[in-house]
Image (tube, helix red, strand yellow):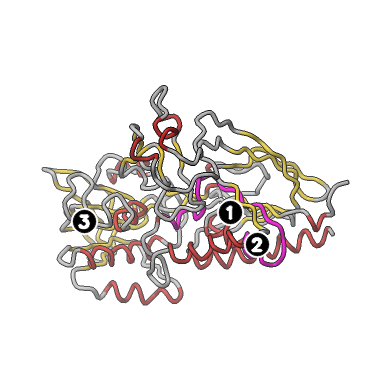
Amino acid sequence: MSAAPQQLPLLVVGAGISGITTALEAAEAGRKVVLVEREPYVGGRITRTHHYFPKMCPPSCGLEINTRRLERNTNVRVCVNAEVTAARRTDTGWSVTLRHQPAYVNELCTACGACSPVCPAEVADPFNLGLARVKAIRLAHGNAWPRRFTLDRAACPAGCRACVDACTYQAIDLDAQAHEETLEVGAVVVTTGWSPYPLEKLPELRGGLDQDVIANVHMERLASPGGPTAGKILRPSDGTAPKRVAFVQCAGSRDVNHLPYCSAVCCLASLKQAVYVKEQLPDAEVTIYYIDRRAPGRNEDVLTRVAAMEGVRLVKGKVGKIARTNGVLKLKVEDVERGVLSEAEADLVVLATGMVSNLKLQAPPFGVLLDEDGFGLPGHDLGLSVAGVARRPEDVAASVRDATGAAARAIAATGRRG
């Protein structure tokens, strides 16, 4: 006999801040929840952020509180390295197929670290967006939870068992296989988050062509103590501190050839990153080129504070092209306020690339309705919700509020069927 509808767990797909919030709010209201994440850790994009609004503090403290809540709450089952491969509607909710990737490092791992030093293989570090190289077996990042090492099996040299031999807990299985399971759930909340617009699609700004033209997400890693430069803002090309830093707003955003919409947080992100630069490199010249200055709500004080900083200029102008001439990055700028075309030089350029909904890139098989930009739309199916940046561009605080509402909707939907 199948379980009563109200006893079926809720499924949350994506364990960024929206997914974690949805899962915890539902679990602490007494519901069973399955939280699914394709990465080997929870936290999503904010784990890669140095500071976030409104307190300008590291996200690690808030995430630690939430992971402790996850650890303590027996109503939540967390599945990392997993994704939804199939789903169909049923009379009581959804029948969902989960694919679990091979657990080369299993739950016996204590994160002691004995395996990593003996590993002969290195890979580009996905957590640091390829800005550094790391061992094939490692902790994904310093605050990763579950606190378990991960292994890029494809990078292992043929016949190598160095990590297995070094592990005294028998936590490494090089022959582990993927497996699938089927879940019956009462409602689904999709919180699959976002990806940055690719630099490579902006060659006119030397995106993907020049090491010293980076995206805003890269700047977060450069400024972070856990990043590839241990928190020092350095030019990727030669490891020197930049003396002139240019922030280019709406890089590929509000542009019919790229992303036609505003991603809501890019202006604030660049203002925040200008503070990173000035705090660390007080003599550096910082210029922010913008179309419009957008700092909604209580964050307007950040705009006022940064605009008043010595050595920071906010120029209303569109950067149309960046070239490297005689080793110097040269920006061609339409200076709107002066009504002239001008040229500026920089040692490091940060492109404020926008948010792309992961639903547009790879939607899970629930038939989520999408708008013309690839963000999830509210549907008539009460058992299916979308929250966070999968639904619209927004900051962390808005995503948390959105996720709380999604948890309430999911609980209400299953209650109606009960």
Q: Is residue 155 left or right of residue 21?
A: left
Q: Which residue is mark 1?
A: 191
The range drawn in magenta is: 23-47
Residue 180 versus residue 73: which sits nearer the camera? Answer: 73
How far is the residue under mark 1 from the one under mark 2? 10 Å
Please tell me whether residue 312 is drawn above or below residue 221 in the rendered image: below
Q: Residue at x 73, y 62 (%)?
A: 411
Residue 153 in the image: state x and y as whole percent.
45, 32
Q: Is residue 347 left or right of residue 194?
A: left
Q: Earlier in the sequence, mark 1 or mark 2?
A: 1
Tell me the amino acid under the disc marked 2: Ala
Specify the label residue 406 is tagged with: 2
**Does the residue at mark 1 contact the one at mark 2 (Cβ under 8 Å)?**
yes
How far is the residue under mark 3 from the one under mark 2? 48 Å
Tell me the amino acid under the disc marked 3: Leu
Residue 339 versus residue 9: which sits nearer the camera? Answer: 9
Residue 29 magenta-drawn?
yes
Q: Is residue 79 left or right of residue 269?
A: right
Q: SS class of the residue under badge 1? A: loop
Q: Earlier in the sequence, mark 1 or mark 3?
A: 1
